[in-house]
Amino acid sequence: IFGTVLGAQTLGIEGLRVGADDDLGKPVDPQELRLKARNHIARQKQLRAMLPTPGLMNGNLADVEMTLVLQVLGWREVEGPARLLLDRGKERGEIHLVGSKPVHAVLGAFTGAKAFFRMLSWRSGKFRLEKADPPPENTLRGGMEGLLLEGMTHQDESLMLVSRLQRLEFPPEAGAIESVAPEDIRPVLAGIREGRSLEELLNLSPLPDLEILRKLETMLDAGILRTVAPS
């Protein structure tokens, strides 16, 4: 928990990105600081209590944030290969770990960073850690801390871009650029021509969602795409 100058929102966001749990605007209210610190300590005790036997735990994401679950796994090295099973309604996902390092993620048809970052944003569902065979492939790079920091950036920037890119279309003068676009973005461009929603477009490519959104924003700024005016 750290303090920032009153109104310094950018500093607060940057602090959260580099691992802070919360920030307080100065001047700091001592009672608020005590309450936040007490709640943080209680959450950490709850997470550590989820490890009654070495390397195994389970719980509900409505009670414990996904980022905190992964932080615990980063703190306490799991003996041998393991996988974190995630269940949210009809969605099923897995994050495979070797020691404390995530090496593979799968969510439906998606693997790697796209799957990992999507599951990182879950606010509901159940999780269970179990021992497992080595993953079929390694689709994640970097340690737990780096992936969590990247995931927070991914979520922040994605939220801003989604609000700008909700409804897209090609202007009448746009040619068939799909034929010259990179292969991993072609299905997304075809989906725009079909009038698909942004949520559907993000499911048409294996690229991480933020990477797709950035490409669409670049095309929007270049005039290759335009936003659809509300009817």
Image (spheres, grey):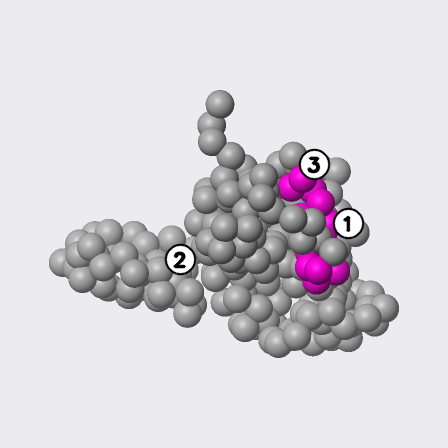
| Left or right for 115, reference 36 | right
| Left or right for 203, reference 166 | right
Does residue 191 show up? yes
Question: Label 1's element?
Answer: loop
Mark with earlier residue (2, 3) = 2
Question: Label 2's element?
Answer: helix
Q: Which mark is residue 40?
A: 2
Q: Main secondary structure of the magenta part?
A: helix
**Residue appearing at x 66%, y 75% in the figure:** 141
Viewer-side label of 3, 1:
3
Q: The disc labelled 2 sits on which kind of residue? A: His
**Residue appearing at x 58%, y 39% in the figure:** 172
Return the residue found at the far top. 231
Q: Which mark is residue 108?
A: 1
**Does residue 227 lie above or below 150 as drawn?**
above
Q: Where residue 24 appears, x then y in whole percent?
A: 25, 57
Q: The disc labelled 3 sits on which kind of residue? A: Glu
Q: Quadrant of the N terminus?
A: bottom left
| Left or right for 18, reference 93 | left
Is residue 191 one of those drawn in magenta?
yes
Label 3 crowd bin: few (<14), some (14–19), many (20+), radius 10 Å? few
Question: Label 3's element?
Answer: loop
List the residue tagged with mark 3: 194
Tell me the magenta residue range. Answer: 180-193
Mark with earlier residue (3, 1) = 1
* Closer to us: 57 or 170: 170
